[in-house]
Amino acid sequence: MESLWRAATGSSWKATDETYGGVEFWTNPERSGWLTKQGEYIKTWRRRWFVLKQAKLFWFKESVISRSSRPRGVIPVGTCLTVKGAEDVIKRPFSFELSTSRETMYFIADSEKEKEDWINSIGRSIVQHSRSVTDSEVVDYDAKSGAR
């Protein structure tokens, strides 16, 4: 039932084979480490091991990751719009948020440096993997309306 709900709403935070298929998250991540994450439904805070690789942010209960590990969730970073500090929003030090057009997730790092490192790494991944607008997709409204 949950997968049907996610398919209907377009939500993809929970990991399935389709959401991480082909990404070898157990080797050479772009960044990995512990973060505290707020739950999606029950808003409790839990410490999880995160792995950023190939525009996907995976999380696990344990820090020892192997080929047989199954992520607890995955965020397709290419669909994210912003990553930024969130101390003013959730009133916790070293916190940051990651947002799509539909939802926002909150995280807490162990230090200011870790927070900045995660924001920078995720931000780079958003830029590298977001869909770029091509010249043929740019609409010139002035030309269509005849304005000069």
Image (cartoon, grey):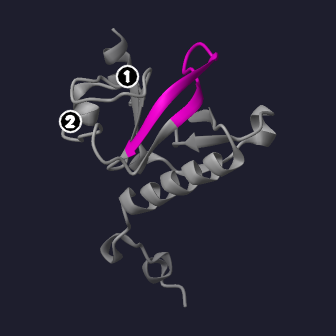
Left or right of 54: which side holds 38?
right
Name above or below for residue 45 compared with residue 33.
above
| Nearer to us in this view, 124 or 31 | 31
Q: Is residue 22 magenta?
A: no
Q: Is residue 46 magenta?
A: yes
Residue at point 30% right, 23% down? 70
Residue denoted by label 1: 6
Number of the label disc, if any, that sits on residue 21: 2
Q: Looking at the image, can residue 25 be seen?
A: yes
Place of residue 81 in the rendered image (x, y in percent of width and height, measured from the top left): 52, 51
Place of residue 35 in the rendered image (x, y in percent of width and height, measured from the top left): 57, 33
Residue at point 31% right, 74% down? 136
Q: Looking at the image, can residue 103 be seen?
A: no
Provide the secondary structure element on which disc 2 rests.
loop
Q: Quadrant of the C terminus?
A: bottom right
Provide the residue span drawn in magenta. Answer: 34-52
Find out whether the residues at labels 2 and 1 contact each other: C-beta distance under 8 Å: no
Q: Amino acid at mark 2?
A: Gly
Rendering quarter of residue 137? bottom left
Report how far apart the C-alphas of labels 2 and 1 lie in the structure. 17 Å
Residue at point 20% right, 35% down? 21
Q: Amino acid at mark 1?
A: Arg
